[in-house]
Image (cartoon, rainbow, N blue to C red):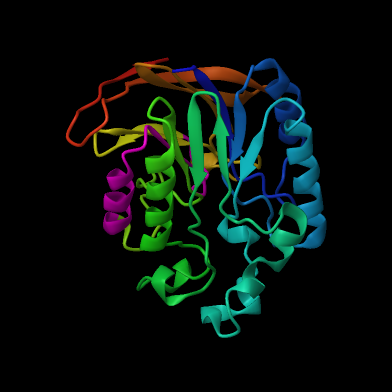
Amino acid sequence: MTPVTLVHVSDPHFGRDCDLAMVDAVERIVPTLDASAVVVSGDLTQRARHGEFQAARRFLEQLSKSAPVLTLPGNHDVQWFESPFWILGRKRLYVKYRRWFGEELTPTLVIPGAIIATMLTSYGVCFPSMTPNLNDMAVKGHLPPGEVERVARLFADAPADLARVVVVHHNVLRGNISRRMGLSRWRTAQERLLQLAPDLILYGHDHEEAAAQLGDRVAVSAAGTLTHRMRGGKPSVFNVVRIDDRTVTIQHWRWQGGAFAPSDRFVFARAARGPGVARGVTAVA
């Protein structure tokens, strides 16, 4: 396969909390990384306001000068207050997002070496995303079976030599600091993702970086946030991910001294297609 390099950024939260120094730093660094694509895994805005979407669009346009850019809505990008529990339909939730980023909420990007499919998990305040904890309202997401079926068809039709990459907004693994899952019915969601047998899953939402595995089979990249609101007061992080024939390598780029610098690196062995094939991992500080 053609090796692939992905820059994975998440949760810029344009608005009150966005750190423009971090945004500027990412814009300067991305052209130097020889990226095959840039993935921004949601929460472009803080309050889904037009001005915030405008700033986010400018950011993505700057990044797109270096590589194709793929994004999808996070829970902060959804106008849940326009139609709680979908009483006025679901379309109202995404009016502003669609104005600034187009009608397609779940775009797919095919590049040499990979097919990258987004899956919508941000649906506002609705019964499938509800949990017994009322603090989860408008925060948690869910992964409908229809999204899994749609991506399964995309992957089935794609050439066999392309790496399969899935992008969601909500964290599919428990946060190390928050100890929270991003999705309701998370066990079912994990099973559905494993059925797709992707090589890599990208997500954000929890404001904590991670490089890990789902089910000892799928590499997972979690990016932090371009704000000061990282879990535990840690420095912000975005990731650079490289996929080749044998491995998936995830490198954290950490905010240090007013700039992003390469930090921890994790190498996961890619498994052959099919269930039940274990992968190894090596962490390199």
Q: Picture coordinates of residue 239 (x, y %)?
A: 54, 28
Give the image quarter of residue 269.
top left
**In the rendered image, the vertical position of residue 61 relative to residue 29, given as above or below:** below
In the image, residue 206 lies at what x, y percent?
A: 49, 48
Quadrant, the C terminus: top left
* Residue at 27% across, 55% down: 187
- Disc tally is 0
Q: Position of residue 251 (x, y in %)?
A: 49, 21
Residue 270, quarter of the rendered image: top left
Q: Is residue 131 above or below residue 109?
A: below
Q: Residue at x 68, y 56 (%)?
A: 46
Residue drawn at the location 66% of the way across and 74% of the way down: 92
| Membership of 12 in magenta stretch | no
Residue 149 occupies which quadrant of the picture?
bottom left
Residue 198, image x, y percentages: 36, 37
Q: Is residue 235 visible?
A: no
Is 202 within the magenta? Answer: yes
Residue ranking furthest to the bottom:
87
**Quadrant occupied by the N terminus:** top left
Q: Is residue 157 visible?
A: yes
Q: Nearer the viewer, residue 79 or 164?
A: 164
Residue 227 in the image: above or below residue 8: below
In the visual, does 46 lie left or right of 178? right
Please tell me whether residue 50 is drawn above or below residue 279 in the rendered image. below
Residue depicted at 50% across the width and 56% down the height = 120
The region drawn magenta spans 187-209
**In the depicted view, which residue is nearer to us: 240 or 88?**
88
